[in-house]
Amino acid sequence: MTSITKKADDENGARAPYREAVTTLVPYNAGLGVEEIRRLYAPPRIAKLGSNENPYGPSPRVRAALADAASLEHYPDPNCRDLREDIARSLGVAPDRLIFGNGSEDILAFACRCFINPGDEVVLSSPTFSVYRDNAIVMGATIIDVPRKADLSLDAAATIAALTARTKLLFLCNPNNPTGNAIPAAEFEAICAAAHADTVIVADEAYYEYARGGDYPESIPMLDRMGKRYLALRTFSKAYGLAGLRVGYGVASESAFARHLDLVRTAFNVNRLAQIAARAAWSDQAAVAKTVSATLAERDRVARALTAMGHEPAPSRANFLFFDAKRPAAAMAQALLRQGVIVKPWGGDFATWLRVSIGHAEDNDQFLAAFENAARATATSDTTA
Ligand SMILES: Cc1ncc(COP(=O)(O)O)c(C=O)c1O
């Protein structure tokens, strides 16, 4: 994909008004929506597996709470007080250490605004969530991109070697999107221990609920114990099934961080319905546990099926799989779209890789059948070419 504009001047000779960093960005690839696929290909059934959403949706308590929502003519609580109390109580942290966003990507954006001065170094490891790089670049950061290991897991030693006193933000996407692998607790601790006192560790845990347990780090108590500066980010978009309402939250190492982050966000960034829905979803942890266990069982089934077809995915602790289709990813994604299956094709060094989210069993079966068809069709056209 290319950036929207490199054009310096308009037809009247006026200089393009954009900051140079903005002209280097490429549009976020949100993929095609269900309506568009229906219009283009009219498939009998659509499996929407391109955005790591939760096909089970939120707890039934959410709909009941939304039906009772009142005061829609008034702005929402800018401090998400009730939701803040609920989450702080469950996590055992002071309420004033919490930050809320219109999705956790909102928090990522205003965290970059809050912390990055031009020339600051930001450490990340591609392929990862593109929002880190885009927002850091807009703020004038220098990106230090640490290569991953052959199995696409984070290279802890290389990450530690990349950390300096100039590192302002260290993005640890855990589990990582798109690769799915998680950083084990011991490595997470070693990396964070090596972070300079001036570095803010951003632990992006959008898929926390799918990954927790075993050797997955409990970052909040761990980093508190270590006395590190950090921001742990989570979301209601994934296991809580509320991607459409946009609520993310973060826990900061200190309340002063939260106060400063609040200065650079818009006041009413989490709308009234989103706050009500998030409280109802949070209150029903049994629904989250049910969703997670169904998703993990399906994920392992899809991983086994892909492996049997010769496309073993990277080890995933999240609700998606990343695998080498061994054919141009964009063409494969297009062939899947024609069969009603939406996945996300990668590019750059991963131009033959696809990311597929885990849906209902029927969605996953539709994906596996469509992938097999598409792979067979390209193999046939390869041999006849
Ligand atoms: C790693 C990661 N972080 C953050 C987000 C943003 O989630 P949201 O803005 O919906 O909370 C996503 C969404 O896909 C993600 O994959």
Image (cartoon, grey):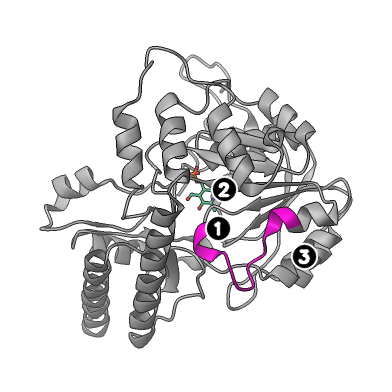
Mark 3 and mark 2 lie on one chain; the one further toward the N terminus is 3
Give the amino acid type for the residue marked by disc 3 in the picture: Glu
Contact between marks 2 and 1 (CB within 8 A): the answer is: yes
Give the amino acid type for the residue marked by disc 1 in the picture: Tyr
Asked if residue 259 lies in the magenta stretch, the reply is: no
**Which residue does the image show at 15% across and 58% down from the upper left?**
45
Mark 2 and mark 1 lie on one chain; the one further toward the N terminus is 1
Q: In front: 68, or 179?
A: 68
Q: In front: 123, or 253?
A: 253
Whether the residue under disc 1 has CB within 8 Å of ligand 1: no
Where is mark 1, residue-wise? 208
Separation of residues labelled 1 and 3 (CA atoms): 17 Å
Separation of residues labelled 3 and 2 (CA atoms): 19 Å
Where is mark 3, residue-wise? 189
Q: Which residues are magenta?
A: 208-221
Mark 1 and mark 3 lie on one chain; the one further toward the N terminus is 3
Contact between marks 3 and 2 (CB within 8 A): the answer is: no
The local secondary structure at tag 2 comes to: strand
Give the amino acid type for the residue marked by disc 2 in the picture: Arg
Where is mark 2, residue-wise? 234
